[in-house]
Image: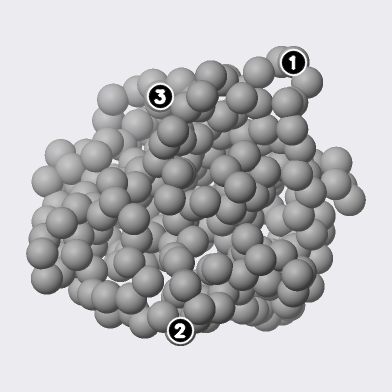
Amino acid sequence: MAIDYYRALALDIPSVEHHYTERDTMLYALGLGLGDDPLDTGALRYVYEKELKAFPTMPVALAFVSLRAIPLGIDYTKMVHGEQSLTLHAPWPVAGTIVGKTRVTEIVDRGPGKGALIYLEREMREKASGTLLATAGMSAFCRADGGFGGPVSEGPKPHSTPERLADLSVDVTTLPQQALIYRLSGDLNPLHADPEVARKAGFERPILHGLATYGVVARALVAGVLGHDGDRLRSLTGRFSAPVFPGETLRVELWREGEERVSVRATALQRGTVVLTNGQAALRI
């Protein structure tokens, strides 16, 4: 079944209510590898109940709707996570109940044999007050679904990575078991745990979740530029360009663009492969 453009844009996707605790907040941060240095007191605030704070990218892991649960008429076996964004409107509570509402914002038909891009947006509100806490956006590249008759374009132009040398780089070594920890925050896809499933998908071993890679990049940014003060992160966007294997070291390059903007790129050092590109963060000063 092909994508029905106007039907997809009009979909009323049911809201998701998500209750989480301080334990979940610490588990999410551990899934990003925070706490790997027991003497790093800046990181400790995200994994220890004393003066606990939620790591700022935690919203991307909560109150989501799997694309497989949305009737879009796509071939899910040939779909990959393309881009991810997050805008934080208020500090994320360390525990509470939130309501997430997802909608399809656009579908780009790149033409027959060229695939389609689906853009989704999820607003997350505190249940008790209705306060908008965060807005997450993502794109999915559907490799087998181009030529369905929708608007044809290449999609929005991504942020350009500066051509000069980075102002700062931060190396983060992921844990060999990191995908097994991160999946406990909600994404139980066996691709990230089961070697047989990974091989069938064309990988030599299980890969790290894309959103875990996104969080690791944010971890480097928060440590390297913001002095571990995650409340100063206002937004982060990035495009996934290759998978990460647990245990690899990511070099996160950071370019300062004034006081409020930072460009971001991440490379898996062992393979010399760029894994997240066209990234940009907005900061609170």
- What type is the residue that disc 3 sits on? Pro
Which of the two discs, 1 and 2, sits closer to the camera? 2
Model colouring? one colour
Q: Name the residue under label 1.
A: 164
> Which is nearer the N-term, disc 1 or disc 3?
3
Q: What's the distance in space between the residues labelled 1 and 2, CA to CA?
A: 42 Å
- What type is the residue that disc 1 sits on? Arg
Q: Mark 2 points at which residue?
A: 23
Q: Name the residue under label 3.
A: 156
Is residue 51 found left or right of 228 in the rendered image?
A: left
Residue 166 pos. (x, y %):
74, 26
Q: Can residue 43 be seen in this view?
A: yes
Q: How crowded is mark 1: few (under 14 residues within 10 Å), some or many (20 or more)?
A: few
Q: Find numbered disc 2 in the image and state the secondary structure of the residue it sits on.
A: helix
Q: Which of 154 and 259 is in front in this view?
A: 259
Q: Find numbered disc 3 in the image and state the secondary structure of the residue it sits on.
A: loop
Q: Residues within 10 Å of mark 3 (few under 14, many from 20)?
A: few
**Residue lying at 55% horizontally and 78% vertically, measured from the top left:** 48
> Which is nearer the N-term, disc 3 or disc 2?
2
Q: Find numbered disc 1 in the image and state the secondary structure of the residue it sits on.
A: loop
- What type is the residue that disc 2 sits on? Arg
**Residue lying at 44% horizontally and 33% vertically, measured from the top left:** 285
> Which is nearer the N-term, disc 1 or disc 2?
2
Residue 271 pos. (x, y %):
87, 47
Above or below for 195 versus 253: below
Residue 264 falls in image quadrant: top right
**Residue lying at 53% horizontally and 39% vertically, measured from the top left:** 238
Q: Which of 129 and 112 is in front in this view?
A: 129
Q: Can residue 139 be seen in this view?
A: no
Q: Which of 81 and 62 is in front in this view?
A: 62
Which of the two discs, 3 and 2, sits closer to the camera? 2
Residue 33 pos. (x, y %):
67, 68
